[in-house]
Image: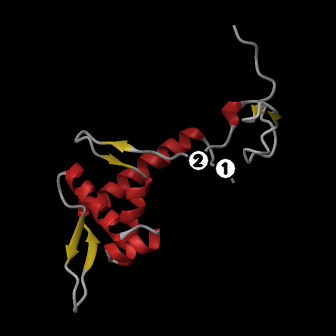
C-alpha cells in the first residue's frame, strides 16, 4: 500500500524536482483532491458527433454576430472551418442548428435555430453541473 503524500512534487523534464513554479503553480499542494480545476467538457452524441467548447463558442458567436463569417473572425477561425463545424453539428444533431441566408449585395446572415439554442443550453447545463461537482474554478 502506498504511503500518504504530504506534498505534491513535480519533476521537470530534466529530472530536477520542481515545486510547481515552472508549471504555473504558486506552491505545492498537500491534497491533490482540493486543487481548483476548470471543467471543460465534450458531449459525445449517439450519432457519433461530438460537441465541445469550440463548437459551442462558435454557436454563441453566431448568435451574437448574426453571421458565420463575423463569428469566425471573432474567434480567429477561418470561414471554411466555421462553415464545416456548423455542417458537422447539423449532421450530428440531424437537424439544422443555424439558419443561413446567402450573402451578396443585400448581405446574408445566420441565426440559431431553436435546436441550436437548446444545444447551447444543454451543454452549459451539463458544464455547470460538472463544475459544481468539481468545486470552484481557479481564480
Q: Do the residues labelled 2 and 1 touch (CB within 8 Å)?
A: yes
Where the N terminus falls, by quadrant? top right
Relative depth, front residue between 73 and 12: 12
Outermost residue to the bottom: 105
The image quadrant where one finds the C terminus is: bottom right
127 to 65, vertically: above or below: above
Where residue 58 sits in the image (x, y, percent)?
A: 38, 64
Neighbour class for label 1 at 10 Å: few (<14), some, many (≥20)?
Answer: few
x, y percent for residue 86: 28, 61
Place residue 101 in its image quadrant. Answer: bottom left
Say whether residue 132 is left or right of residue 50.
right
Q: Is residue 16 visible?
A: yes
Q: Is residue 64 visible?
A: no
Q: As drawn, is 38 to the left or to the right of 31?
A: left
* Location of residue 75 by image quarter: bottom left
**131 vs 28, nearest the viewer:** 28
Residue drawn at x 42%, y 46% is: 126
Which residue in the structure is indicated by mark 1?
Answer: 138
Task: For marks 2 and 1, give the CA distance.
Answer: 6 Å
Residue at the spot of label 2: 38
**What element does badge 1 sit on?**
loop
Mark 2 surroundings: few (<14), some (14-19) or many (≥20) residues within 10 A: some
Judge whether 24 appears above or below 79 on screen. Answer: above
Give the mark, 2 or 1, whose residue is nearer the N terminus.
2
Horizontally, is 110 left or right of 131 in the view?
left
Residue 53 is left or right of residue 18, and the answer is left
| Residue 8 in which image quadrant | top right
As helix, strand or loop, the secondary structure at mark 2 comes to loop
Q: Residue at x 33, y 77 (%)?
A: 66
Q: Eyeballing the image, is 57 above or below 24? A: below
Q: Where is residue 79 in the image (x, y as percent from the top left)?
A: 34, 70
Amino acid at each position: 500500500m502506498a504511503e500518504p503524500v504530504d506534498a505534491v512534487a513535480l519533476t521537470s523534464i530534466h529530472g530536477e524536482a520542481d515545486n510547481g513554479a515552472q508549471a504555473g503553480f504558486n506552491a505545492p499542494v498537500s491534497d491533490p483532491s482540493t486543487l481548483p480545476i476548470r471543467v471543460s467538457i465534450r458531449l459525445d452524441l449517439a450519432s457519433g458527433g461530438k460537441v465541445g467548447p469550440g463548437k459551442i463558442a462558435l454557436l454563441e458567436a453566431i448568435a451574437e454576430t448574426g453571421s458565420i463569417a463575423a463569428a469566425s473572425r471573432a474567434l480567429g477561425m477561418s470561414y471554411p472551418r466555421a462553415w464545416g463545424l456548423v455542417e458537422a453539428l447539423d449532421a450530428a444533431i440531424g437537424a439544422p442548428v443555424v439558419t443561413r441566408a446567402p450573402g451578396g449585395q443585400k448581405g446574408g446572415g445566420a441565426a440559431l435555430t431553436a435546436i441550436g439554442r437548446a444545444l447551447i443550453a444543454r451543454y452549459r447545463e451539463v458544464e455547470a453541473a460538472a463544475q459544481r461537482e468539481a468545486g470552484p474554478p481557479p481564480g
